[in-house]
Amino acid sequence: MKNLLVVAFFLSFSALSSFSQTSANSLGTSDPDAKKILDAVTAKFKSYSSVKAVFQLQIENSAGKVQGTKKGTAFMKGNQYKLELNDQEVFCNGKNIWTYDKASNEVQLSKFDPSGNSFTPQKIFANFYDKDFLYKLNGEKKEGGKTLQEIELTPTDKNKAFFKILAYVDKASRNIVSTKVFEKNGNRYTYSVTSFTPNATIADATFVFDAKKYPGVEVIDLQ
């Protein structure tokens, strides 16, 4: 099964959800003002019972040319999530993960890792800066009637494929509206939230793959 779209989406944010053994404090000091903002973002996100977010992922090469734009929707509730992408759907009910590829009509079933080392969309909005980054507040800018606070994150592990991440926080709502990952090879991945609905009504069945709704689907059990 080809998972290119999911890989591209995860690549933009897997950097934000890693847990290294190196303490940022041993390499430098982070900006306390930036920490206050990031802590507020995490607290605000955790206060929601559920979230529906419509997003866009834009990929640029080293010359600044846009290589592709992907759109999708993320549903989150506790440790459950669903991603609806152009060519794929990903379901997670907190126990299992189903990755469905529309073109091949195949779904891969795997176990969800509750240890915290696996990617989840929730990590885009909360707890993405612990231990692995030095961060600073670059300032504020106006965009679309909003005041955005730009926070620059630098990985403490210099072996990472990226060297910088810019996170933009809506000063009023304390929600992350976009992040931009800068790779060492010049590629840039920009994730933008175009619609954010907190405390949305989402049934638990949303996070479970129902084979009956996909006639002829081939299930590949990787458990």
Image (tube, rainbow, N blue to C red):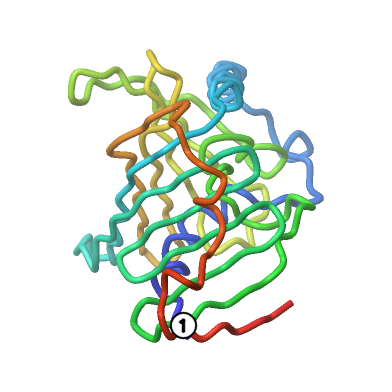
Q: Residues within 10 Å of mark 1 (few under 14, many from 20)?
A: some
The image shows residue 56 at horizontal and vertical percentages of 30, 50
Q: Residue 96's quadrant in the figure?
A: bottom right
Q: Quadrant of residue 187?
A: bottom left
Dot 1: element:
loop
User: Which corner quadrant holds the C terminus?
Assistant: bottom right
Check the image and report above or below for 180 versus 127.
Answer: below
Instruction: In the rendered view, tell whether residue 194 sits above or below residue 211.
Output: above
x 53%, y 64%: residue: 209
Instruction: Name which residue type carries label 1.
Output: Val
Name the residue: 37% across, 56% down: 189
- Residue farthest along the front direction in this orientation: 212
What residue lies at 49% left-to-right and 53% top-to-bottom? 82
> Foreground residue, 115 or 139?
115
| Viewer-proximal residue among 18 and 112 | 112
- Expressed as whole percent of the image width and height from the top left, the position of residue 203 reads 51, 42
Q: Nearer the viewer, residue 118 or 104?
A: 104
Q: Position of residue 160 (x, y in %)?
A: 60, 61
Asked if 207 appears above or below 42 in the picture, the reply is: below
Residue marked by disc 1:
217
Q: Residue furthest top?
A: 172
Please provide percent x and percent y for residue 118: 67, 57
Number of residue marks:
1
Left or right position of 157 against 135: right
Left or right: where does residue 216 sit relative to residue 60?
right
Direction from residue 139 to residue 90 in the image, left or right: right
